[in-house]
Amino acid sequence: MHDAVIVGAGFGGMGAAIELKRLGLHDLVVLEREDDLGGTWHVNRYPGLAVDIPSSTYSYSFEPNPHWSRLFAPGEELKRYAEHVAVKYGLRPLMRFGVTVTGARWRGDHWEVRAGAETIAARYLVTATGFLSMPKTPDIDGIGSFAGEVVHTAAWEPTDLTGKRVAIIGTGATAVQLIPELARQAAALTVYQRTPIWVSPKPDYPVPPAVRRVFARLPFAQRVVRWVGNAVLELMMISGVVRYKQLRVVNRLAERWCRAHLRRQVRDPLLRRRLTPDYSFGCKRPTFSNDYFRTFTKPHVRLETSAIDRVDASGIVTAAGRTDVDVLVLATGFNLWDTNFPAFEVIGRDGKDLGAWWRQHRFQAYEGVTVPGFPNYLSLNSPYSYSGLSYFTTIECQMTHMRRLFTAMRARGSAFFEVTQRANDEFLDRMRTKVVENTVFSLGQCATAHSYYFNQHGEATLLRPTSTVSARRAARSFPLADYDFSGRGSSVIDDTAATSSRRF
């Protein structure tokens, strides 16, 4: 029997493996359905791919990378960084690629994980399947009948677009990076927009070799840059979004900053109006770009905001007319709430189905990590887990939670942990109260945002509605009494919790 099975070889899964190895668990298996590690930075290869926050903040704090070539590093550098981490921390020998996990079940004292035709037994189960791992294909009439080339941004293949008529559906963060690249190649580009996006100027500059050498020789210098980057992100996401009630002025300033950026790049007032969101800043993930808005001013680029009626063999039909297309690009994002929470069937104590329970009793996880009724289970991509704008803040908070949890378990001479129903319910109540009373998701204008932050119940349960400082403090000092270490477990769900959880 293995010590642990980790599902997912992206940065979350690698962080979990590093922490478990530090805790003395070395018989680990990391299962990955793709053919290599890196998660989103392996799967995504579209032109213009880059990290959409400063590179200095997008790395493990204990493994800084002094070699970023730009302030916002291109995707291939993130992939190389992932490979570096895997080699340095001895993770590659633990990984199995091309393995799709279809289910996991608790068997009283261990987990059994179904991976293809194989069943793998382990004391602990960690799911690190990522928030953005299940591409979403739009439900548009006739899309299967299109005779030209169709490509999803998450399954990009090199394509020569020279002289071709290209259409792209979607204007999220991925599209913001891709659209300027498509416009440089295509003879004609039509962008189908359902929801505009808030876009800020991108202070993206090359990092001079001399500065990289300083970072390599004086790690403290890079830590200072990281601190500044984190402070800016905290101001944008936490002050203006999570603490919207108290700091509404910060949200308004962010909107004005983005509007001024749009005004500088687009002089046509009608086009500018169509590119301006009608929802509050932060309802949907904002992004950075210096050339996205400017692309729409080019003569061969057209913005289409009419709803798509259907797709036929040669093009796209809207109420405004039809457009002939050679290549159709789908920048339609990912399916979080229908298929990714969880990404496969997880059956806990007494046959409790995690996916069904989440959908019947609200999406929830204690400190964004553990779930009552699921012993020895760590869910790293969970409701209320994402803290701030850098995914690495979330990863390292969860690593800290794991360290405190396993240390306490060992001190008690136990091999079991399970969060109590009481602790879970109290945490859920605190998070829901903060979302409702303080955040832009409840107090702002979010109805038209079409944001993946909101689940199918209309609740914003992806982001943790606290500061990153608070999240780190909770990971270091959560009450150990919130866990049962006996291995006997608590009741799956009491009547009071069941009743309150059904109030949508």
Image (spheres, rainbow, N blue to C red):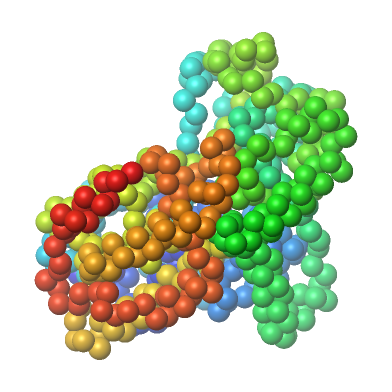
- Front residue of this view, candidates 500 and 410: 500
Rendering coords of residue 72 (x, y %): 71, 59
Q: Residue at x 25, y 79 (%)?
A: 481
Quadrant for residue 476, please give it: bottom left
Q: Would you place residue 488 above or below residue 223 in this image?
A: above
Looking at the image, the residue that sits furthest to the bottom is: 411
Rendering coords of residue 312 (x, y %): 55, 13
Position of the N terminus, as image quadrant, is bottom left
Let me know if residue 347 appears in the view.
no
Q: Would you place residue 135 above or below residue 249 in this image?
A: above
Q: Residue at x 65, y 27 (%)?
A: 192
Q: Residue at x 76, y 41 (%)?
A: 292
Q: Would you place residue 64 above or below residue 32 in this image?
A: below
229 with respect to 156 (left or right): right
Let me know if residue 202 appears in the view.
yes
Rendering coords of residue 221 (x, y %): 73, 82
- Front residue of this view, candidates 433 and 321: 433
Quadrant for residue 147, please give it: top right
Q: How many marks?
A: 0
Position of the C terminus, as image quadrant, is top left
- Front residue of this view, candidates 304 and 95: 304
Q: Residue at x 48, y 71 (%)?
A: 471
Rendering coords of residue 80 (x, y %): 60, 63
